[in-house]
Amino acid sequence: MTTFDERERSYEAKFARDAELNFKAEARRNRLLGEWAAALLGKTGDDARSYALTVVSSDFDEPGDEDVFRKIAADLAGKMDEAEIRTKMVQLRMTAREQILNEN
């Protein structure tokens, strides 16, 4: 095997690891976001967990974050404005990524 082939395999492996990390971080961010929104809505226990799962599943509607944002924004209408929700999404994305990296 040549050095070029080894380098190519290394880049492919890194790409796969990064893609997996991003997927896990998005899913965890969505769960954390759902838990945060559930608390604002006064949900606790099983209701809060169930709500968080609806937020996670809303991410499968379309590529990107807008489907999750629209769900949270509609559910929190009058309680949080768009900027606060988007800021929380960014914060929780970083939190989720750090949690996953610390697990490995």
Image (tube, helix red, strand yellow):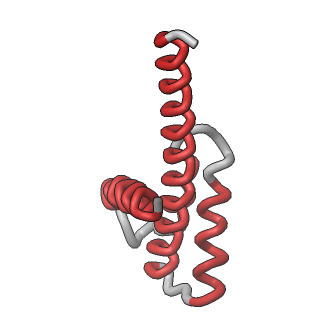
Which one is nearer the viewer's eye here, 19 or 26?
Answer: 19
Q: Can you say whether 7 is above or below 42 in the image?
A: above
* Number of numbered discs overlaid on the protein picture: 0
Q: Position of residue 83 (x, y in %)?
A: 31, 54
Q: Position of residue 87 (x, y in %)?
A: 32, 56
Q: Given the current orientation, which residue lies at the most extreme bottom position? A: 45
Apparent side of residue 45 relative to residue 90 in the rendered image (left or right): right
Residue 16 visible in the snapshot = yes
Q: Quadrant of the rendered structure where residue 1 is? A: top right
Which one is nearer the viewer's eye here, 60 or 3?
Answer: 3
Apparent side of residue 10 relative to residue 62 in the rendered image (left or right): left
Q: Quadrant of the rendered structure where residue 12 is? A: top right
Q: Residue at x 51, y 19 (%)?
A: 6
Q: Position of residue 4 (x, y in %)?
A: 49, 10
Residue 73 visible in the snapshot = no
Q: Residue at x 61, y 78 (%)?
A: 49
Q: Can you say whether 43 is above or below 84 in the image?
A: below
Q: Given the current orientation, which residue lies at the most extreme front position? A: 1
Q: Residue at x 58, y 81 (%)?
A: 48
Q: Can you say whether 99 is above or below 39 in the image?
A: above
Which one is nearer the viewer's eye here, 24 or 54?
Answer: 24
Apparent side of residue 50 relative to residue 14 in the rendered image (left or right): right
Q: Residue at x 60, y 38 (%)?
A: 63
Q: Position of residue 68 (x, y in %)?
A: 55, 53
